[in-house]
Image (cartoon, rainbow, N blue to C red):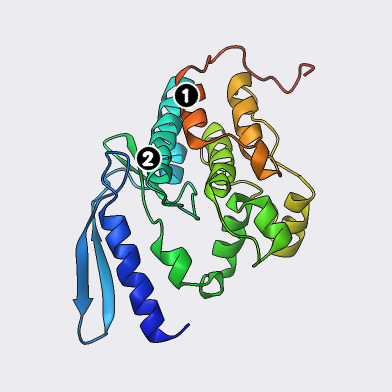
Amino acid sequence: MDEEVVKKVFRNELKRLNGAKHERIIELYGISLDIEKQTFYLVMEFANNGTLREYLKKNNLEWPEKIRLASQIAEGMSYLHNIDIIHRDLTTENILIHNENAKISDFGLSRNLLSMAANSHNDVVGKIPFIDSRKLEVGENYLYGKKSDTYSMGVLMWEISSNGRPPFSDDKNPVSLMKKIIKKSREAPVPGTPYQYIDLYSKCWDHEPDKRPSMKQILDQLNSLEVNPKYDDCSPG
């Protein structure tokens, strides 16, 4: 991409992100330029509990707390979609926790300006489960939409149920992993997960975008979700 085009996209994205003001969004305070290195730095709100993945691993959360965090994320994503911002990289590592509350970060800029080739092998494999399965199937010609974020939200909700275990963590081969996901392979429910929660995230990661709920619908269902009955892998159904 031409350098001037990159700068123009960067400026336009900064304007959009600077307009995203919500308690569930990490706030962008400004931008700093290192003249010597010719490097831009984003100055953003600090989150004192780290990433959602880290927080889940460190804290054995009960289901009401897990649902509360999922609801907060859906609330923030619903806000972004209402102002026509698509995240494109919604994962448990891009959700930050501040004072035990979820805040969405790292949206917009990196997906437009950087390629996944710049990331390490492990980073790429770790992101694959969160990528819209239709995007994996179609490739570059498939445009991310709001329902792509919905797909990612479904995977994120599953990871919340697993207490921070990365999805498909045993599969280190990106090609075979992509093929599995395209063929509609998904992580199995975690024992002890509410049935209504499983049903909701399963709808989110449906292979067909039109069958996925909107973020507003996800938020509404999470806010009315019953924690019982729960899934038991030893029982039928």
Q: Is residue 112 in sight in this rendering?
A: yes
- In terms of secondary structure, where does tag 1 sit? helix
Residue at 51 percent across and 75 percent down: it is: 118
At which x and y percent is residue 177?
72, 56
- The amino acid pointed to by label 1 is Asp
- The amino acid pointed to by label 2 is Tyr
Q: Which residue is mark 1?
A: 220
| Mark 2 to mark 1 CA distance (whole Å) | 13 Å
Q: Earlier in the sequence, mark 2 or mark 1?
A: 2
Q: Quadrant of residue 192?
A: top right
- Residue 94, compared with residue 229, is above or below; it is below
Residue 210 left/right relative to 227: right
Q: Which residue is mark 2?
A: 79
Residue at 62 percent across and 60 percent down: it is: 125
Residue at 22 percent across and 67 percent down: it is: 31
Disc 2 packing (10 Å; few <14; some 14–19; many ≥20) = some
- Residue 71, compared with residue 9, is above or below; it is above
Residue at 20 percent across and 62 percent down: it is: 30
Q: Quadrant of residue 65?
A: top left
Of residues 78 and 53, the one nearer the viewer is 78
At which x and y percent is residue 59?
41, 33
Residue 19 left/right relative to 189: left
